[in-house]
Image (cartoon, helix red, strand yellow):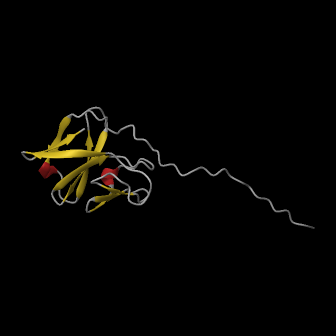
Amino acid sequence: MRAELRYDFYEMKPFETGFGSFKRPRRTGQVVTVGRVRDVPEGRGATVELLDGSELALYNVAGKFYAIENFCPHRGAPLADGQLCGPTVMCDWHGWRFDLRTGACLNNAGAVETYTVIIEDGMIKIKI
């Protein structure tokens, strides 16, 4: 008796990097005040929810503030919750790392939007 080998083939789907955040702020050129400097301790990130429901991730890196879109382009993880190491944040879900200065992904294809942060009289303002 001869054994029959059976193989089940499954369709492999390409690795997708186009999450496309519907909560990414639209560029308007508007400057919005989002909080006080003292509310974001050094080495920490914070989620900033804007009036239209869109979100940014705001970071304090050694007294310098950076803002990027809040959701990883890979699968949509909130980047404000990621691990901060200098001017780099790592997505908690799959380890994608982003340079906060440029938005470039350092270990995969992709990038996130960056936004200009202005500090004025102890207040944090972001140009959308």
Q: Residue at x 79, y 59 (%)?
A: 6
Answer with left or right where residue 41 lies relative to residue 68.
Answer: left
Q: Quadrant of residue 64?
A: bottom left
Q: Position of residue 34 (x, y in %)?
A: 18, 41
Residue 19: % across, % down: 45, 44
Q: Furthest-right residue in view? A: 1
Residue under the image location 68 percent in, 52 percent down: 10
Q: Nearer the viewer, residue 113 or 52?
A: 113
Q: Find residue 94 and report its image quarter.
A: bottom left
Q: Position of residue 78 (x, y in %)?
A: 36, 49
Q: Is residue 81 left or right of residue 10?
A: left
Q: Position of residue 48 (x, y in %)?
A: 25, 43
- Residue sitting farthest toward the bottom: 1
Q: Residue at x 37, y 46 (%)?
A: 71
Quadrant of the image containing the N terminus: bottom right
The residue most toward the left is: 121
Locate the C terminus and report the quarter of the image it occupies.
top left
